[in-house]
Image (tube, rainbow, N blue to C red):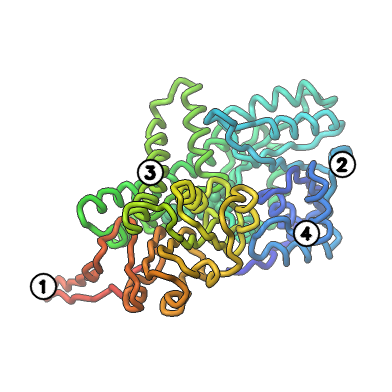
Amino acid sequence: MSTLPPASPSPERAPRLTVIGTGYLGATHAVAMAYLGFEVLGVDIDQRKVDLLNEGTVPFFEPGLPEKLDEALASGRLRFTTDLDQAAEFGDVHFVCVGTPQQMGSEAADLRFVDSAFTELARRITRKVLLVGKSTVPIGTAERLTTLVQEISPLGAELEVAWNPEFLREGFAVQDTLHPDRLVFGVTSPWAEDRLRAAFEPILAEGTPLIVTDLATAELVKSAANSFLATKISYINAMSEVCEATGADVVQLAEALGLDERIGSKFLKPGLGFGGGCLPKDIRSFKHRAEELGIGEAVAFLGEVDAINVRRRLRTVALIRQVAGGDLMGVRVAALGAAFKPDSDDVRDAPALDVARMLYLEGAIVSVYDPEASVNAHRVYPDLEYAASLDQALVGAEVTVLLTEWQEFRTADPAQMGEQVRTRTVVDTRNALDADRFRAAGWDYWALGRPHTAPVPVQVVVSNRSQAAGRVVDKSADLPC
Ligand code: UGA
């Protein structure tokens, strides 16, 4: 899909924008808005990050973002600073994009960074501007922040807060920001709506659907969307548990379910489960907030969604232990992947790294290889061995485990891989490898939720009602692996 800029903003309406917080969300938002034609000032408390961004270096891996950063910097419309005074002076619309991680020792979100960004800005605001939250927050945060900033700001009750949740996926951040499938504006006045319409004019001009709503609904859209996605993944992974107990095949099951348009095949990929900096902490924070509100029962199922997801990791370790002969002590394991998903170097709550760590704790000699996330993974778990290449990770392996479905692993030649390892045993925790190719190359192929022997090919019967006859199509070659 194209990432060319749509219509530029009208100069007379275009607000000057600041973006507070330059992590995955903020850096992408700042770059995208400048690319679309706005004057943008990115702000972060981390001088190193600010320096890197000003030099044209994205401090994390995100396909397509470095090129867009270069273009935006060259246009002269984008710069980064640590100076909030400058930001308060500069911006007409301020986007707050700081992190809301899980609190230590609690399932609640840690709102310290959000609170600090809003209050520090508010102290400095002396003219009518709009403060917009984009971070994922518990319902009621925007209303609380409104009271807080109005107390602090010299502008008093005139200072308005809006909420504009972000739905970008890591790995597709540029595309999702420039061409989102919807925009949501949580506002308390027509003026705030108008300011946001002006800030998103080029994107709205593309015909992007817009929902204008109240603050609480805007906050809830994000928690509800991520909860739904997590639930869908855990649903198919719960079915995977049923398949493991009955000999059914979860990949074929997912394909059959996904063909029902009401269900759909997206986010129905069975495997090691979800991780990252968003889904796990968002469902926990949502559940925690619901309990605070006295409506915990309404989303109690999210506890089960979380538990199913965590069980996938334990089940994976159990399967690897089983194929290794019942004991992992001294077993050499090639762990392919550390990032929480492909096309990302993010290892926050990464199922892959968690499994590698559990194998290590059981005595396995684990060699991890990830095309982009090894540096971050090493920072979190320095005790694991990190290989510089796929081949190096495979050398002498007794069990090879696919943990993150990078393209490099999906397309690797099983015969060539087999030359490096000691034993041709592979555990495919993402149902992402071509099982037939691996078996043909002499590998003992194992996967979660699939029979150990080759499954019966999927057959789709296309019936012609008038002739009452059926045609059988062998779709086994089209299986998602
Ligand atoms: C997620 C949402 O998809 C975004 O819409 C949202 O904006 C973002 O969180 C956020 O809150 O900021 P992201 O964390 O980048 O985006 O990753 P996803 O693509 O949603 O994947 C999440 C996890 O689910 C990954 O670990 C992935 O491997 C896993 N997954 C995904 C599955 O196990 N099965 C699937 O079918 C799909």
- Mark 3 or mark 1, which has the lower sequence index? 3
The residue that label 2 is drawn on is 83
| Near-viewer residue (102 or 439) | 439
Q: Secondary structure beneath disc 4?
A: loop
What amino acid is found at the position of numbered circle 3 in the picture?
Arg
Give the number of marks: 4
The residues tagged by marks 4 and 1 sit, at their Cα atoms, a distance apart of: 60 Å
For discs 2 and 1, the disc positioned in front in the rendered view: 2
Ligand 1 is within 8 Å of the C-beta of the residue at disc 1: no
For discs 2 and 3, the disc positioned in front in the rendered view: 3
Q: Which residue shows up at 13% across the image and 73% down it? A: 466
The residue that label 4 is drawn on is 37
Disc number placed over residue 273 in the picture, else none: none
- Mark 4 or mark 1, which has the lower sequence index? 4
Callout 2–callout 4 Cβ contact below 8 Å: no
- The reply, left or right, for residue 82 in relation to residue 369 is right
| Near-viewer residue (448 or 40) | 448
The residues tagged by marks 3 and 1 sit, at their Cα atoms, a distance apart of: 46 Å
Ligand 1 is within 8 Å of the C-beta of the residue at disc 2: no
The residue that label 3 is drawn on is 311
- The reply, left or right, for residue 132 in relation to residue 437 is right
The residues tagged by marks 2 and 1 sit, at their Cα atoms, a distance apart of: 74 Å
